[in-house]
Image (cartoon, helix red, strand yellow):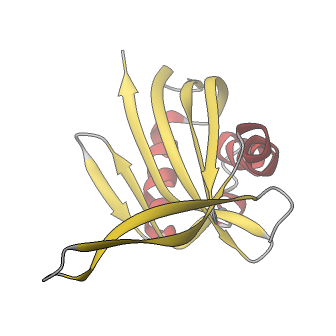
Amino acid sequence: MSSFTAQRKFCLIIQTFENSSQNLLSYKKLSITIKFLLIPEAEAALKPQFTKFIHALDNLDWTTAESYFHQDAVLVFKDKEATYGSKAIIENMSKFAEVSGKTVTTLSEMKYEGTGDYLIVNGSMVSETEKIGNMKAKFFQVWKKEGDRHLILHDHFEITP
């Protein structure tokens, strides 16, 4: 178990009928293990990777940016389209960058959470672009543990006024 994973055991009491003709009740204890990540631990695990990912996007470093996506990643651009696969996602991002140019992204309202092998980050961003001005958005991402790091499995993006 990783150092940032906490474990809790809960006992549930399940009522079962042992003999329906006599309506006898017995209680069986069921032990369930639930893994969860505390918010500071999720942030400590994900923030360094997330920051490097944003830096790669701002600098149009597509090779590095692609290395942060799971091969089966999905990018959802709310009310517009969804793209499947890391290579297709990077192709779409690079096409958009031809129109927008390099960006400088400022993040706010960041929240990190996690459970098991999954970390979640959501927040707001403003990207100052070279060619099309400021772009504001809200986003959330689900990162899945793969080996010794996490990769983006789901990226959901919504342009805001």
Give x and y (percent) for residue 95: 45, 52
Above or below: residue 64 compared with residue 102: below
- Please tell me which residue is depicted at 49% across the width and 41% down the height of the picture: 140
Give x and y (percent) for residue 133: 50, 18
Q: Quadrant of residue 148?
A: bottom right
Above or below: residue 100 compared with residue 155: above
Q: Quadrant of the C terminus?
A: top left
Q: Quadrant of residue 146?
A: bottom right
Identify the residue at the far right of this view.
3
| Residue 90 in view | no
- Please tell me which residue is depicted at 51% across the width and 69% down the height of the picture: 86
Give x and y (percent) for residue 92: 43, 56
Give x and y (percent) for residue 111: 62, 32
- Please tell me which residue is depicted at 65% across the width and 25% down the height of the picture: 107
Question: Seen in the image, is 128 located left or right of residue 149?
Answer: left
| Residue 100 in view | yes
Q: Nearer the viewer, residue 2 or 131?
A: 2
